[in-house]
Amino acid sequence: MPDLAAEVLANPEKYQGMSIPVNSGYITAADMEKELSQATNQNIRYHEMTDEQMASLPFPAAAELANMFAYYKRFPYYDQMREPSKCIYKGPSFAEWAQQNAKALKAQIPA
């Protein structure tokens, strides 16, 4: 993504008024679970929550986060209709990102 930002800043007239789609593909929660488990060598599990359960989590802005996800469920992002191959910038896949960040991800997993 830094290359994209540098390109836009270097050529603002080329991108003025444009919506610049950025996508690395679509992935399910089950796929994320698999990729995170592989990257961390840990058994990562996805547990779906209701909006109310998420809002009640004991961390700052949990309610705001729950509201954001509720909004996305109600109004899916328009770019989900666009093929990732048609995007101006294609970032790393989720699997690539997980591998690149495996050390930091492992550090967040309780022992």
Image: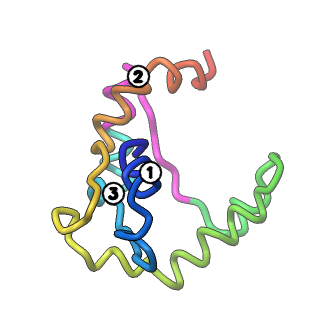
Q: Position of residue 66 (x, y in %)?
A: 68, 65
Residue shown at the point (44%, 77%) measured from the top left: 77
Separation of disc 2 and disc 1 at Cα?
A: 30 Å
Q: Which residue is mark 2?
A: 40
* Amino acid identity at mark 3: Thr
Residue 65 vs 98, above or below: the answer is below
| Mark 3 → mark 2, Cα distance in angstroms | 18 Å
Horizontal relation, residue 62 to residue 30: left or right: right
The amino acid pointed to by label 2 is: Thr
**Which residue matches tag 3?**
28
Which residue is under mark 1?
5
Q: Position of residue 109 (x, y in %)?
A: 57, 24
Q: Secondary structure at mark 2?
A: helix
Q: Secondary structure at mark 1?
A: helix
Q: Position of residue 86 (x, y in %)?
A: 18, 68
Front-lying residue, 3 or 34: 3
**75 over 104 or under it: above or below:** below
Label 2 Cα crowd, 10 Å radius (few <14 / some 14-19 / many 20+): some
Q: Is residue 36 magenta?
A: yes
The amino acid at mark 1 is Ala
Q: Are marks 3 and 2 in contact (CB under 8 Å)?
A: no
Residue 18 in which image quadrant? bottom left
- Tell me if residue 7 comes above or below residue 52 in the rendering: above
Query: Could you tell me which secondary element the residue under label 3 belongs to?
Result: loop
Tell us which disc is closer to us: 1 or 3: 1
Residue 74 lies left or right of residue 91; in this view the side is right
Q: Which residues are magenta?
A: 35-48
The disc, 3 or 2, on the residue closer to the chain's N-terminal end is: 3
Quadrant into which the C terminus falls: top right
Which residue is located at x 53 percent, y 84 percent? Answer: 74
